[in-house]
Image (spheres, rainbow, N blue to C red):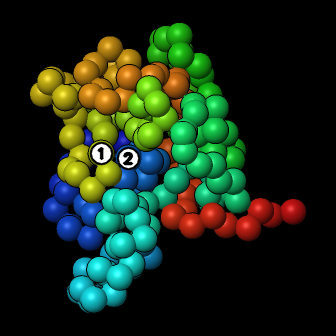
Amino acid sequence: MSEPIYEPNKWNKNKYILKSHNCYMYALNKIDKKIMNTCKKYIRNKKTFKKNRKKFKNKWDFLWSRPGKAGGYSFSKPYVCKDVIRGILIDCPKSKYMGTKTMNFKCPKKFYRIALFQTKIGKDYHFYRQDKNGMWSHKNGWRKATNKDCDGKLIADPKYSNNGIYKVFCGYFLVPNDSNKKKMSNITRKKKK
């Protein structure tokens, strides 16, 4: 199996990782040290942090990676599944979109599953990932990584768990375990020609 190991302390203990890494970064199982250090800089320099924070509805938003930004693709609210799906496939071209029907598809070696949801009116989206133990986990924005849903139950399949405001299921993906095959960015990069 090549699924990530569920290690909440890796994401929750260091406050700079906790605040600067969102659900997408967690689903890709990638910690970006540059983004973590930017977070550290802003937290330590409160004046700069307050000034930068005013630009964003959520104070940590400027640090979080978004699907497609690493590949030069950006989209705006209201979010729709097809845009977020396209963004993932641009950032991680070896990934495969598997649809919404079932997760009973074979997971090839060196791949693992993630799932995507969005709110009904497209205000936000959220990712889950399947871990080595077969259960699912997630990290909601600046909150702690967990393997429980909104009812406090372990997540056997996010499609059938209580996902709070994330009611629209966009589908499952196969994502490579190799970090070099997954890109992420908190700023929209220039498209490569």
Q: Position of residue 170 (x, y in %)?
A: 52, 25
Q: Are marks 2 and 1 in contact (CB under 8 Å)?
A: yes
Question: Outermost residue toward the right?
Answer: 193
Q: Considering the image in quadrants, where does the C terminus appear?
A: bottom right
Which structural element holds mark 1? loop
Q: Residues within 10 Å of mark 1 (few under 14, many from 20)?
A: some
Q: Seen in the image, is 110 located left or right of residue 3?
A: right
Q: Residue at x 20, y 50 (%)?
A: 144
Residue wearing tag 2:
23
Q: Considering the image in quadrants, where does the N terminus appear?
A: top left
User: 52 and 20: which one is in front?
Assistant: 52
Q: Residues within 10 Å of mark 2 (few under 14, many from 20)?
A: many
Residue wearing tag 1:
140
Give the residue type that dot 2 points to: Cys
Q: Residue at x 37, y 60 (%)?
A: 57
Of the numbered discs 2 and 1, the one sitting upstream in the chain is 2
